[in-house]
Amino acid sequence: MRSSWTTSTGATPTDPATGEPADSPAWELLLPAASGPPRGRGRELGAALRQSVREGRLAPGTRLPSTRDLARDLGVSRGLVSELYAQLTAEGYLTSRQGSGTWVAALTRTPPSPVAARPGPPAAPVTDFRPGLPDLALFPRAAWSAAHRSALAGLPDAALDYPPPQGLPELRAALAELLSRRRGVVVAPEGVLVCSGVAQALTLLGRVLRARGHRVVALEDPGSLSQYPLLSAAGLRPVPVPVDAEGLDPGALAASGARAAVITPAHHFPTGVVHSPARRAALLDWAADRRGLLVEDDYDGDFRYDRAPVGALQGLAPDLVLYTGSVSKSLAPGLRLGWMAPPAELLDELVEAKRVTDLGNAVAEQAAFAGFLRSGRYDRQLRLCQRRYRERRDALIEALTAAAPGVRISGVAAGLHLIAEFPFPVPEAVCAAAGVRLRPLSDYCATAPAADATDAAPAPATAAHAAPARFVLGYAHLTPSEIQRALGRLAESFRSVAV
């Protein structure tokens, strides 16, 4: 005998999709799940029955077979069916009536919202000179895997508990040594805070500053526009402050009303300007006079190709500068590993902000990075990246010069990008025809685009808007051959327009 579904009124339920009688016996709905492996059979049966109820294949009020009949039809134990009925009754899919059996509950259903048709993503350009992206193919997979294995093998069981929100002590010690040796940062292991990249560093700092009564924070213009929503979400009002040939304008900073400013003094993004000694001193004077804070984003300070990198501003005044950096340019952004060296008076508040945000970074990643630093592998990785990125910068300059005679390159020989100013307009259609994507400098301006930071006098804003010829070109993620082919196509596109 095979059991069938019936409704509470005694009528045969219908299929909601077709309106035809839905007198399928129980085993036809559940037999595929019942034929699965014994260990997961109860879970599969429960999932099949839930789905049948949700989709309306079992109408509200449908009476289910007795546990004995259904167990016999499916070839499973009666106890398994009893547990299944009890579980789905507790979840609200079924109802049970004393002495009357088990029934399908009436679920509250809402019709699905219509999904508006959206245009598909634009076709990806053949070559995208996106700034700020490292060569992810250089990530040292084997060495990182070895560091991970070694770290996990050496971690005691207790270390797998929630980590100290400030970061593992061994990683903070390794970072303090690295930052002191390579960037001139003045910090002890006790003063380092491990975080999930510079983005989280700014988010945590924004919350702390807001709690301390700050309302405004100054950002470089042009600069990284991604900082605006981060700091706005923390309750601060970001204001753009112009950058000139020596760095952030201290006069405009003083007029902004801010008591905190985020700067990139070793290699300004995106213009490539290095803050001059006089400008560094002026900004430190501003911070001292206003009881303010300079936030030093040292995003690519390790990569200088013509001389030793300029040391961190924090080394001159650790009480006035919060230093922050990450592995996003040296290893990979996806690791989400960064650090802060804040003034001592802010440390406890930042650590507490980190604790309530995510309880600390992943233990295994921290331990692996600590071992990676101590082994010298990180220094070797930096040297490898320096060689490759310098070759690619040289290849880009050579290809630009050949494609557009008279092109002007600005920014020091450092980092992962440069500024190219073409001697003629470069319409987007010309780049698209060549399968190349270039980003104009104006994309990084919060206010009307100004002249290149190295210009003696600004160009008219109307001209800059009409035909921006200054572009921010990233090269680290492209091989020399990719760069040469892309610029060759762009040169052909230029010639076709000229003809």
Image: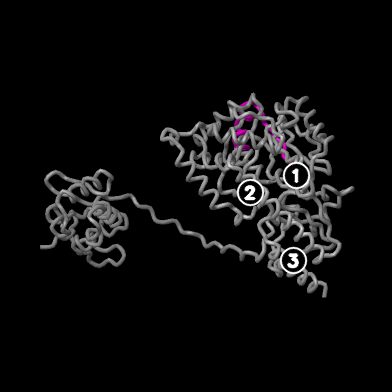
Mark whose residue sits in front, 3 or 2: 2
Please name the amino acid that badge 2 sits on. Gln
**Quadrant location of the C terminus?**
bottom right
State the image quarter where residue 308 is shown: top right
Kindly indicate whether the residue at mark 1 contacts the one at mark 2 (C-beta within 8 angstroms). no
- Is residue 225 part of the magenta span, yes or no? no
- Counting from the top left corner in percent of width and height, residue 240 is at 74, 41
Q: Nearer the viewer, residue 95 or 51?
A: 51
Mark whose residue sits in front, 2 or 1: 2
Q: Residues within 10 Å of mark 3 (few under 14, many from 20)?
A: many
- Give the spatial CA distance, label 3 vs label 2: 29 Å
Q: Residues within 10 Å of mark 2 (few under 14, many from 20)?
A: some
Q: Please, which residue is most extreme toward the left here?
A: 1
Q: Secondary structure at mark 3?
A: helix
Q: Which badge, 2 or 1, comes first in the chain's sequence? A: 1
Which numbered circle lies on residue 487? 3
- Counting from the top left corner in percent of width and height, residue 60 is at 25, 53
- Is residue 206 part of the magenta span, yes or no? yes
Pointer 2 residue: 381
Q: Which badge, 3 or 1, comes first in the chain's sequence? A: 1
Query: In the displayed structure, does residue 115 sit left or right of residue 65?
Result: right
- Give the spatial CA distance, label 2 vs label 1: 20 Å
Pointer 1 residue: 267
Residue pictured at 86% horizontal, 52% vertical: 459
Q: Nearer the viewer, residue 75 or 480?
A: 480
Q: Please, which residue is most extreme toward the right here?
A: 456
Please name the amino acid that badge 3 sits on. Leu
Residue span colored magenta:
201-221
